[in-house]
Image (cartoon, helix red, strand yellow):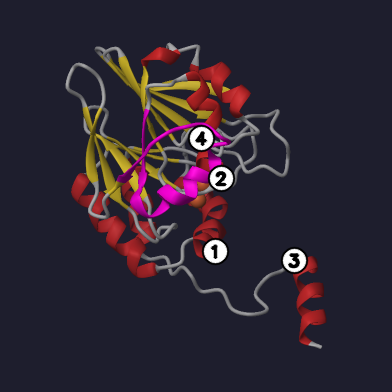
Amino acid sequence: MNSQIIFESGDHKCIFIGRDPKKKEQIIDTNEYIIQSGDEAILLDPGGIDIFPAVLAEITKYVSLENIKVIFASHQDPDVSSSLAMWLDLVKEVKIYTPWIWTGFLAHFGMGTEFTLNGLPDEGAEIKIGSNGSTVYAVPAHYAHSSGNYSLFDPKSKILFSGDIGAALLPSDYPIYVDDFASHIKYMEKFHQRWMPSTQALRAWVRRARAINPSVIAPQHGAIFTGRNVTMFLDWLDNLEVGKWEMGSESSDIYKTVWMRWKK
Ligand SMILES: [Fe+2]
Ligand SMILES: [Fe+2]
């Protein structure tokens, strides 16, 4: 697992964790992020059970576990927070925030641990981190892709942590930052077309993102957008049609076999 500081100013820093060359091939690669402000930290989308030891080993290079006060789960997927019970064993006083519609679903990741899930309201919310008064904002991203879903904006770093929006399926040696946007599209296009159900919802998120005007967009899979790539990415999303699956459009042989059998 790799990691690096992607923002640092005074006592505020953001850390990227991802690109695990040792993860099993069938597991989708994920990015985990930590925002540390003063002596407290928020862990964003802590990841799945399988990669928990690797993520933990990276996090402890930067942050003391007792300083992690908040866990944010952008939506209900297992790659986002199926490791929750393991984290709760280590950081007992932590506050967990997730979309209100998924609290009863995330509770299935508890593995017998007693914990409270704080449901975020549909319109979003501010979340305080750090004794220095730092606040981050849960920005609605419903139906992009999950029906209850948030991005998270950190005004100090001006990073918009976008969840699955901007996700790319990349080789494990791909750089952490997007360099040439045009050649990056091929890694993102199919993911968005299939995992994003609503063009209308995606356009609404782009309007929100433009209003926020982030310096950096950091997705939960793939590479980070900086500089003019932020605008190029938002422009690209604004012109993308998603949720357009049609019967027979899958290329998988397994799919075709199953479908042909079912049709008979
Ligand atoms: Fe997801
Ligand atoms: Fe994801």
Amino acid type assigned to the residue bearing label 3 in the image? Ser
For mark 4, what is the residue? Answer: 31
Q: What's the CA distance linking mark 2 and mark 1?
A: 18 Å
* Residue at the image point whose x is 46% and y is 27% from the top: 16
Is residue 108 in sight in this rendering? yes
Circle 3 Cα neighbour tier, 10 Å, few/some/many (<14 / 14–19 / ≥20):
few
Q: Quadrant of the C terminus?
A: bottom right
- Give residue 21's position: percent from left, percent from top: 68, 29
For mark 3, what is the residue? Answer: 252
Q: What's the CA distance linking mark 4 and mark 1?
A: 20 Å
Q: What's the CA distance linking mark 4 and mark 2?
A: 13 Å
Q: Could you tell whether 159 is left or right of 191 in the image?
A: left
Q: In which quarter of the image is residue 11?
A: top left
For mark 1, what is the residue? Answer: 194
Among the two numbered marks 2 and 1 on one chain, the one whose residue lies closer to the N terminus:
2
Among the two numbered marks 3 and 1 on one chain, the one whose residue lies closer to the N terminus:
1
Q: Could you tell whether 85 is left or right of 151 in the image?
A: right
Q: What's the CA distance linking mark 2 and mark 3?
A: 23 Å
Amino acid type assigned to the residue bearing label 4 in the image? Asn
Among the two numbered marks 2 and 3 on one chain, the one whose residue lies closer to the N terminus:
2
Mark 4 or mark 2, which is nearer to you?
Answer: 2
Mark 2 or mark 1, which is nearer to you?
Answer: 2
Among the two numbered marks 4 and 1 on one chain, the one whose residue lies closer to the N terminus:
4
| Near-viewer residue (104 or 259) | 104
Residue range highlighted in magenta: 95-119
For mark 2, what is the residue? Answer: 78
| Near-viewer residue (253 or 235) | 253
**Decide: marks 3, 4 in contact (CB < 8 A)?**
no
Among the two numbered marks 3 and 4 on one chain, the one whose residue lies closer to the N terminus:
4
Among the two numbered marks 4 and 2 on one chain, the one whose residue lies closer to the N terminus:
4
Q: Is residue 153 above or below residue 204?
A: above
